[in-house]
Image: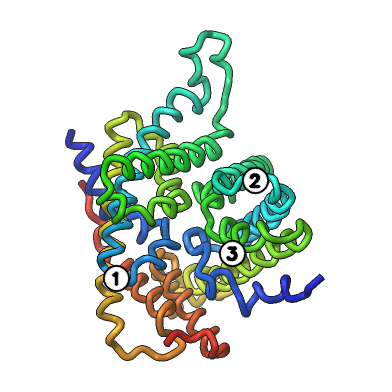
Amino acid sequence: MDKKIFIEPLFRNNPVTVLVLGICSALAVTVKLEPAIVMALSVTIVTGFSGFIVSLLRNTIPNRIRIIVQLVVVAMLVILVDQILKAFAYDVSKQLSVFVGLIITNCIIMGRIEAFALGNKPIPSLVDGLANGLGYGIILIVIALFREFFGSGTIYGIQIIPAEWYIKNGGFYENNGLFILPPMALILVGLVIWVQRSIQKELQEK
Amino acid sequence: MQDLVSLFVKSIFVDNMVFAYFLGMCSYLAVSKNVKTAIGLGVAVIFVLGVTLPVNFLLNKYVLTPAALAWLGPDFAGLDLSFLSFIIFIAVIASIVQLVEMVVEKYSPSLYASLGIFLPLIAVNCAILGGSLFMQERGYETLAEATTFALGSGIGWFLAIVALAAIREKLAYSQVPKPLKGLGITFIVVGLMGIAFMSFMGIKL
């Protein structure tokens, strides 16, 4: 099997920064690292298996109603993920709130099904879906790392900035509250795109 | 009545779908290159939200919430179908979008010509499903409340996309560093717009 299917979506053809898919949920869950990792895993699982299932069914789905069939497959997987999260990671599932449900309309999933799974065998579709989910996860984790570190002084809930540095403890440091707020996520994605396109000149727009 | 007015204003500005929750971002970034198409998509979103959200509200109230099926008889009172809500909401949205498309095509060809291409796109716009999920999570109680919230969020999304399209039209003439051109600068502009919209946050109605 072609190794490119797995490697390309991680960086060179990243679904978020290059294909501009799945931005909606990418930004809302990145205030802290933990929900970002849970979200990344959930999306990876749903993208992988929805690609696999749709690819198994691809010769039997009538073209006219394929969107509804795809949505039903995706919705079923998302319900499974949601129920599992509610059972085993209730706090994170509360933090993610509606964004677990919104995985259904995450454009990465529909985009990969339309662009790849409908025309390929089940196993490559599974790999393609997982790789795209991971590519999405990498961006999510980078953004969440910056936002959590500058916004709360912690990484994965562990205090990194020494407590005595803070002004309230007689120090000089204050967390940057802007990083917690939604707009900063957008600006950070803009900066990630800037870095990536400086390295990969062929992606630059005229 | 006063509650409804304040909910309406709040869902347009304070809880703006785009700037506070990032909903509908994909089409927001893809279809905001010029003002005319942005207006088309914006109107379609208001329309579809205004139709699907009340329908989903009724379904949620009379079918999905725990013990909602009591009106069918005492045998059904113990059922809790809330785990089905994702699949039902998305099925309602997909089929209503399809239906609206056919009705508009038949009765108003001119509207169809301007909205036509955007309607199928909207079935997978997260702002629409997000609206229904927020309605469920926040527990709006009456149909009037749900409809007001739907229209308010739709108008908020409309304003956001038209504003971004207007900025991007001007941006085409400015000197932007090469790697930042196009997508990168658009993200940063949306971020700055979000900061501006946050000034509404402290408003109490």
Residue ID at (72%, 71%): A5
The spot of residue A138 in percent (x, y) is 62, 71
Query: Are discs 3 and 1 both within one chain?
Result: no
- To the question of a shared chain for discs 1 and 2, the answer is no
Q: Secondary structure at mark 1?
A: loop
Crowd tier of the residue under label 3, counting other residues whose Cα lies within 10 Å: few below 14, some 14–19, many 20 or above = many
Question: Which image quarter: residue B23?
Answer: bottom left
Q: Nearer the viewer, mark 2 or mark 3?
A: 2
Q: In the image, which disc is placed on residue B34? A: 1
Q: Secondary structure at mark 2?
A: loop
Tell me which amino acid carries mark 2: Ile
Q: Quadrant of the C terminus of chain A?
A: bottom left
The percent coordinates of residue B170 (x first, y second) are 25, 80
* Residue A158 seen in the figure: no
Q: Which residue is mark 3?
A: A33
Kindly indicate the quadrant of the structure image that contains residue A199.
bottom right
> Residue A24 at x, y = what percent?
47, 60
Residue that carries the numbered disc 2 in the rendered image: A61
Disc 2 crowd, CA 10 A, few/some/many (<14, 14-19, 20+): some
- Helix or strand or loop: what does disc 3 sit on? helix
Q: Which mark is residue B154?
A: none
